Image: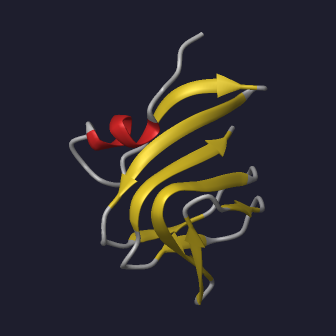
Amino acid sequence: MSKINLPETAQTFPQAWTSRIVGRAAGANVKVLRMDDGAYPDESHDFDEALLVIEGCMRLDLQGQVTEVQAGEVFIVPAGVPHAVAPGSHGTLVIIDQ
């Protein structure tokens, strides 16, 4: 077992919006990434996805409705739901998925 400083890890990545798996728990991937002010395009998955903001704010766009997810908050996107990230998001994001 080891501990991982998620914000420090995300800062070492050369590009924003590029996630890396930092571990697995209960069969799920635990990923971290660095958000910058740019947008991330629409995507959907065949599994639920938990988006946990560690630092900053993610502006999650669900079919034109933008919801701000603040540090310490998690948003669970159900399988099959298209989602994107609107401009102005910044900080550290943890993604828990399959």
The one nearer the camera, 71 or 38, is 71
Coloring basis for residues: secondary structure
Q: Position of residue 90 (x, y in %)?
A: 37, 66
Q: Farthest residue toward the left?
A: 14
Horizontal relation, residue 76 to residue 30: left or right: right
Q: Nearer the viewer, residue 97 or 94?
A: 94
Residue in front for this viewpoint, 88 or 55: 55
Count of labels shown?
0
Tell me where residue 7 sits by quadrant. Answer: top left
Q: Judge from the rendering whether residue 16 lies leftward or rightward of residue 80; answer left or right.
A: left
* Horizontal and vertical percent position of residue 9: 36, 34
Q: Residue at x 57, y 24 (%)?
A: 23
Quarter of the image with the C terminus in it: top right
Q: In the shown orientation, is residue 10 left or right of residue 66? A: left
Q: Quadrant of the N terminus?
A: top right
Which residue appears at 63% of the width and 33% of the height?
29
The residue at 78%/62% (across/down) is 78
Q: Residue furthest bottom?
A: 64
Q: 39 above or below 7?
A: below
Which residue is most to the top?
1
Point out residue 76 in the picture as x, y percentages from the top left corner. 73, 60
**Which x, y percent locates residue 66?**
57, 85
Residue positioned 56% across, 69% down in the render: 70
Give residue 24's quadrant in the image. Answer: top right
Q: Is residue 68 above or below residue 98?
A: below
Q: Nearer the viewer, residue 39 or 68?
A: 68
